[in-house]
Amino acid sequence: MANCLLLFAGCFLAATALVAAADGELKIEVTHAVEKCSRKTQRHDLVTMHYVGALDNGTQFDSTWERNQPFQFQLGIGQVIKGWEQGLLDMCPGEKRKLTIPPNLAYGDKGAGDAIPPGSTLVFEVELVHTADGPVPPNVFKQIDVDKDEVLTHDEVSNYLVSQAKQHGQTVDKDSEDHKNVVQTIFDHEDRDKDGVISHDEFSGPKKDEL
Ligand SMILES: [Ca+2]
Ligand SMILES: [Ca+2]
């Protein structure tokens, strides 16, 4: 649920940049502390963890323990919900936390699939298994903004997605409804002021040249 199966940028844009209904605060409780470790989680780390996710009414929707397979992802590049990006930093392997994540830092007023209704507050019990250096992400904004005018148009985003798909050996028909929907979904999430372009400020993906 939290990971992104598609390999191009539109995936994380669509998955993470959700418009907030009302802003709530992330609550982080350390349920098992680990005092000393040689390395704590930081941005861009490749993180391996176990988690169980539930709605705030207690309904569980996912558990890596039950699947017996920890989840791996990279922190700080928009692969996961914001509550995770913020709530899993500075953590030692073995440490356990309980994260209570308001909808604006989770799946917002859209929800996710059947399991997570719109406006859900999510409760995750997480255990960090392992953390290691990850690759520094490219400046995706720059890659998309071909004409370098510091805003992303529909065409630029569309061309970028096509080229990314090509790199992964897939062909995308620019005129297909599916593709248009993907681009539109990105604009629905990213073009917050609805002026038809995505500004540098609005863009939620990687956009810095260095750390
Ligand atoms: Ca541009
Ligand atoms: Ca805009």
Image: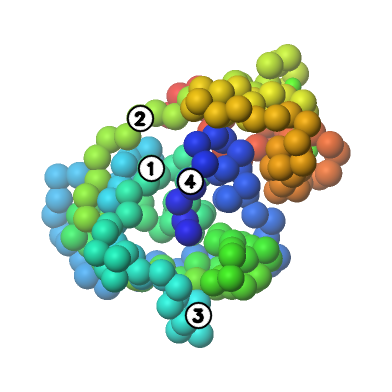
| Residue placed most toward the observer, 97 or 67 | 67
Residue 195 numbered mark, or none: none
**Of discs 1 and 4, which sits in the foreground?**
4
For label 4, the crowd category at 10 Å Cα-Cα, with few meaning under 14, some 14 to 19 and many 20 or more, is: few
Distance from label 1 to label 4 (Cα)? 13 Å
Per the image, the residue denoted by label 4 is: 5
Tell me how far mark 4 sits from mark 3, CA to CA: 26 Å
For marks 1 and 2 on the same chain, the one whose residue lies earlier in the sequence: 1
What crowding class fits label 2: few (fewer than 14 Cα within 10 Å), some (14-19), or many (20 or more)? few
Badge 3: how crowded within 10 Å, few (<14), some, or many (20+)? some
Q: Which of 42 and 197 lies nearest the eye of the viewer?
A: 197
| Secondary structure type for disc 2 | loop
Lower sequence index among marks 2 and 4: 4
Image marks 1 and 2: residues in contact by CB distance under 8 Å: yes
Q: Quadrant of ligand 2?
A: top right
Label 1, ligand 1: CB separation under 8 Å: no
Element type at mark 3: loop
Disc 2 marks a residue whose amino acid type is: Pro
In percent of width and height, residue 128 lies at: 26, 57
| Lower position in the chain sequence, tag 3 or tag 2 | 3
Mark pair 1, 3: CA separation? 26 Å
Q: Which of 111 and 119 is in front in this view?
A: 111
Residue denoted by label 1:
74
Residue 146 lies, in percent from the top left, at 68, 16
Q: Is residue 94 left or right of residue 168?
A: left
Q: Residue at x 65, y 54 (%)?
A: 18
Residue identified by numbered label 2: 135
| N-terminal-most mark, 4 or 3 | 4
Task: Give me the C-alpha separation between circle 3 and circle 2.
Answer: 34 Å
Looking at the rendered structure, the kind of residue marked 3 is Asp
Per the image, the residue denoted by label 3 is: 56
